[in-house]
Image: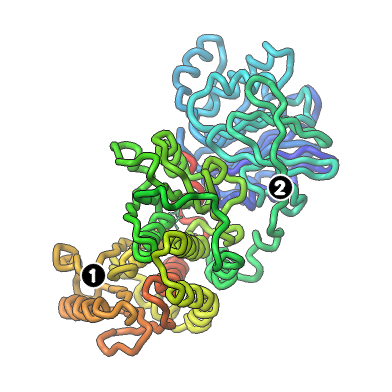
Amino acid sequence: MCGIVGYTGKNSALTPVLDGLRRLEYRGYDSAGIALATQVGKPLYVEKQAGKLKNLEEALVKKSDSNSGIGHTRWATHGGPTDTNAHPHLDNEGKLALIHNGIIENYVELRQQLEKLGHKFKSETDTESVVHLLSDARKDNNGDLAAAMRQVCKQLKGSFTLLAIHSDNPSHIVGARRNSPLVVGVGEGENFLASDVAAFIAHTKIALELGQDQVVEITPNSVVVTDLSGQIVKAKEYEISWDVSAAERGGFTHFMLKEIYEQPKAIADTLIGRLNGLNLKLNFKKFEKIVIIACGTAYNAGLVGKYAIEKWAQIPVDVELASEYRYREPSLNKKTLVIAISQSGETMDTLMALRYAKSKGATILSVCNTNGSTIGRESDEVLYTHAGPEIAVASTKAFATQLIAMYLIGLEIGRKLKKLSNNEIKEITEQLTQLPAKVEQILETVEPLRELTRKFKSAESVLFLGRHVGYPTALEGALKLKELAYMHAEGFAGGELKHGPIALIDNGTPVVAIMPTSSGILAEKMASNIQEVKARGAVVIVISDSEFTGADHLIRIPEANQLLQPVLSVVPLQVIAYEMAVARGNDVDQPRNLAKSVTVE
Ligand code: M6R
C-alpha cells in the first residue's frame, strides 16, 4: 500500500529515487510522483502521473535534478488514481512536499479547520490535510521541520509513514511512522528513507529500524531519530542479509516465475539449523490452545498449520481471518498462544488482531519474512521465514516457507510436550529435508502443464477440490487464479461438493483435484468426487503422486508424508495461475486492484 523513498546525499537524487520506486512498485502502482529540491528557497520541482511508474518516467524527459528528493508510488484509498491525487502533495507556496502511506482517519475535520484558515486544497486525498498542517507547524517551530513533524504526528489519527522535504533546507528529509513501515538506509555521504530496504539495497546494506511514533531526520551525513517528545532515540541497526540480485528478475520473464523457481532454496534456507529445535523462549506447557491469525495466502498456510500442529502437538488450534478476529469477542487469555503469519510483517489486519490478542494477555509468536517488520517487533517471539524478498504481488515462495514454519512449530511443540516419539520426529525431519529436492523435481516437469493450462484460458470458472490438507491447498490454488487470471475460481473440500457447489459444474468446467495417495482412504473418497463431477461434464485435472486412470489430465508429483503434501501440490497450482495470467494477457507481477502489502484495514 504505497511505496515511499527519500534520498539526500552527494549524488543526484533522481536516479536513486526512481530506482527505489521501481523496486517498491509492488506496493502500489496506480500513480507515482517525485519532488526534488532543485533550488534553495524556491518551489520544489514536482512531477506526478496517474498509472504505472513508466508514465512518470516518460514525463520526466526534461530531467531536473538535485541532491535530495522524495518519491511515491500509490495504491489509492482516498481519492481516485488521478494526477492530482498522486503524491507528493504541496503546501500553498510549493516549497514543502509530503508523501504518505496509510490512512489519516481525522482528515475531514483537519481539512475543515485548515480551509477556514485559508489553506487551498487541490486533491481529494486524506494526505493533503497533513501537508497544510505541517506547513503551519513549521512556521510555529521557526522552520524546524522535524519539530513540526513531531507536533503534527500528535494531531493525527490513523496509520502513516510520512516523508517531507522543504526547499529552504533542501538537504534535510524528515520522516515519521505509526503503524506503517519506514526504514533508514545508512550510506557513506548519503542516506535513504524507504518503506522497504529493497529501495536502497543497491546502495547500502546497513539499515536502521524505526519504532512506533518516531521521527527521523536525515542529511547526507547524519541520521537523528527522536520520539514525539523530541527525546533522541537509538535506532536498532542491522545488516540486510540478501543482495540486490535477489530483488531483480534475473532472466525470468516475471518475478512470480522467478519466485516459483526459488522455492527449493527458500524451503532449504528456512529449514536450515532448525530441524533439531527452534530457539524460542516460550513455555509451551502453559498454552491450552493456539490461535493462528493471518490474511489471504498466509491464512491458507495457517489452515495447513492447524492440521500439523493438532496432529503432532495435540493442542487445539483455531485459524482466524485476522480482519474478522477482533470484531467479535473471541475467547482468548494468558493460556493462549497466538501465531501471526505475515510475509510482509506489516499487514494492518494482522497487526491489529495481534494487538488485540496481546491486550487480552495472549503470547504472540509471529512468522514473518521481513526483518524488522512491525508484526515481528511487536511479537514475543518471531520465527523468520527465509524466502528472501518476494516482489510479485502473488505469494508463492513465501507461502512455501510459511508452510515450513508451521511444520517446524508443530514439530517443536510436539517435541517439547513429548507428544511425538523419537521415531516420529526422525521420520518428519527426514521428510522435511527431502522437500527442496522434490519441489525441484516438480519444477523440472511443469512444461506440459503450462501448455495444458492455455487450453482453458477462456473457461468461465475453475474449481479446486481437496480433502484434509488438500482443502487449504485447493483454497490457495483458487486464490492464486482469482488474483492473477481474474477468473472465477473456488476451492472446496471434496466432501462438501454434494452440499451445493456441485451445481456449479457444467459441460467443460475445469476442475483441479488434489489427490495424493498418502491421504489413504481420503484419496478413495476424492476418486468418487472426481467421478461425480465428471459425470456432470467437468474436465478433471488431477494432481497426484500415483497413476490414476479417472483423470482427464494427470499431473504427477512426488510422494511425501500426508501433512507435508501441500508444499508439493501447490506448485502445479501456482504454475496454472501464472500461465493462465500470461495466456489472458494480464499483468502477472502487478495484478489489477491489488498491492503486495496491505497496510490499511
Ligand atoms: O504480507 P502478508 O503475508 O501479511 O499478506 C497477506 C495477504 O495479503 C497475502 O498473502 C495475499 O493474499 C497474497 N497476495 C496472495 O497471493
Q: Nearer the viewer, residue 92 or 334?
A: 334
SS class, disc 1: helix
- Residue 29 visible from this viewpoint: no
- Measuring from the top left, give residue 45's x and y in whole percent: 71, 33
Mark 2, other Cα within 10 Å: few <14 / some 14–19 / many ≥20: few
Residue 528 position within the rendered picture, expressed as x and y whole percent measured from the top left: 19, 79
Figure colour scheme: rainbow
Verify CB contact (< 8 Å) between mark 2 and mark 1: no
Please tell me whether mark 2 or mark 1 is closer to you in this view.
Answer: 2
Q: Say which amino acid is labelled 2.
A: Tyr
Q: Is residue 552 left or right of residue 582?
A: left
Residue 74: % across, % down: 54, 42
- The residue that disc 2 covers is 238
In the figure, 91 relative to 60: above or below?
A: above
Mark-to-mark CA distance, 2 and 1: 47 Å
- Residue beneath label 1, please? 494
Q: Is residue 290 left or right of residue 68?
A: left
Compared to residue 437, the image places residue 339 above or below, namely: above
Q: At 28% from the left edge and 80% from the top edge, which residue is drawn? A: 520
Q: Indicate the quadrant where residue 177 lies.
A: top right
Is 149 drawn above or below residue 441 in the view shown? above
Report the side of 301 relative to 11 (left or right). left
Q: Is residue 160 visible?
A: yes
Q: As displayed, is residue 160 above or below residue 307?
A: above
Residue at (41, 50) in percent of width and height? 295
**Residue depicted at 46% across the width and 68% down the height:** 578
Q: Looking at this view, is 65 or 107 the one in front?
A: 107
Residue 244 placement: quadrant: bottom right
